[in-house]
Every structure is written in C-alpha cells, then in structure tokens.
Amino acid sequence: MRKLNIGLSEEQRAGVIELLNHDLSNAYLLLIKTKKYHWDVVGPQFRSLHQLWEEHYQALTENIDALAERVRALGGYPIGTAEGFLKYASIKEHIGDLPLATEMVSRLVDDHELVIRNLRLHVEQCSEEFKDDGTADFLTGLMEQHEQMAWMLRSFIEGESISPDGKQPQAKTPTASHA
C-alpha cells in the first residue's frame, strides 16, 4: 500500500482508527437493536414507533458506512465481524428479552446517550491528542445526529412512565385533608 501523506503520523492515524472502530461497533449494535425493536414493537404506539425506528435505522446504516469509509480513508480497516463489534462496543445486548414499547424506547435513549458521551470524548481526543480536526468534525456531525434521535425518543416517553430526567416518578401518596 502506498504510504499516506495527509499530515498525520502513522501513530496519530492508528489512534483515530481505534476510536472510529469503537464508534463503528457501537453504531452497529445500536442498528441491530433498533431494527429488532422496529420488528417487534406492539401496542397502540406501534405505527409511530415502527416508522420512527425505520428512519433511525436508515440513518444509522448510512453512518455505519461513513464510519467504515473514514477508517479506510485513514489507511485502516474497519471492524466487520459480530465478534469484533461485541468486543469493541460499549452498548450491551439484551438477549432473549422483549420489553414493552416504552422500555424499548428507554433502552434506545440510554444507548444513544452512551454513544453521544463516547463521541464527545472521541471528538476531543481526535482534535487535541491526535491533531485530526477532520475526523473531529466528522464525529461532531454524528454526535449531533444521535442527539436529535435521543431527543425524539425522550419526547416520545415523557409524560408516560418516566420523567424528563429519565427516572421513574415517585408515587404520590394522598394527604389527608383536615377540615
């Protein structure tokens, strides 16, 4: 392979590629979970969630391709196996568990927020540690997309079984009125 001369050392590129492969793995597991919930959701909110998750998994599919191509542009090779995705990802699977729709939404919010936190850290590392502002900008765009997806999901469940901060509301105990 021809030696790359793009203003980043081999060590800088290797560090960025490592970060990108973690992001790629998380994106892939989030795609799998989103598709699974898209297929399995039931209840009165079926249509709206089914459509929302189709939009999300289409965006995630495009992002996955963009992440893999960014790795290749930097001279690396993207993770491309289930074993590799599981090894590199922070997102956890819920094997054999099929929750109710609101819990599906809540889990996806948690996963998107985890991805956002990781991307925020990776943006900083790319820029400051590895001096790769191009990848930092690329990851910022991905982070903004996840922020919007998380907001849409949070908006769906607000006012139902969890409060806007993501916590279960405390049951209110009736107070006796003294006349």
Image (cartoon, grey):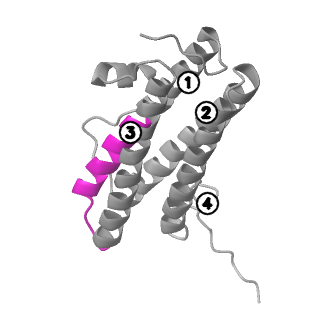
User: In the image, is residue 69 above or below residue 58?
Assistant: above
Please say whether residue 91 is visible from this viewpoint.
no
Q: Earlier in the sequence, mark 3 or mark 2?
A: 3
Task: Give the mark toward the camera: 3 or 4.
Answer: 3
Q: Is residue 34 covered in magenta?
A: yes
In this figure, which residue is indicated by the disc labeled 2? 135
- Res 19 label: 1
Task: Give the mark toward the camera: 2 or 4.
Answer: 2
For image coordinates 35% across by 71% down, the residue present is 48
Residue type pointed to by label 4: Gln
Please say whether residue 11 is visible from this viewpoint.
yes
- Res 65 label: 3
Residue type pointed to by label 3: Asp
- Please report the bounds of the magenta region as a residue range: 26-44
Q: Earlier in the sequence, mark 1 or mark 4?
A: 1
Residue type pointed to by label 2: Thr
Image coordinates for residue 167, horizontal then vertical, percent: 59, 54
In the image, 45 versus 147, the foreground residue is 147
Task: Give the mark toward the camera: 3 or 1.
Answer: 3
For image coordinates 44% across by 25% down, the residue present is 72
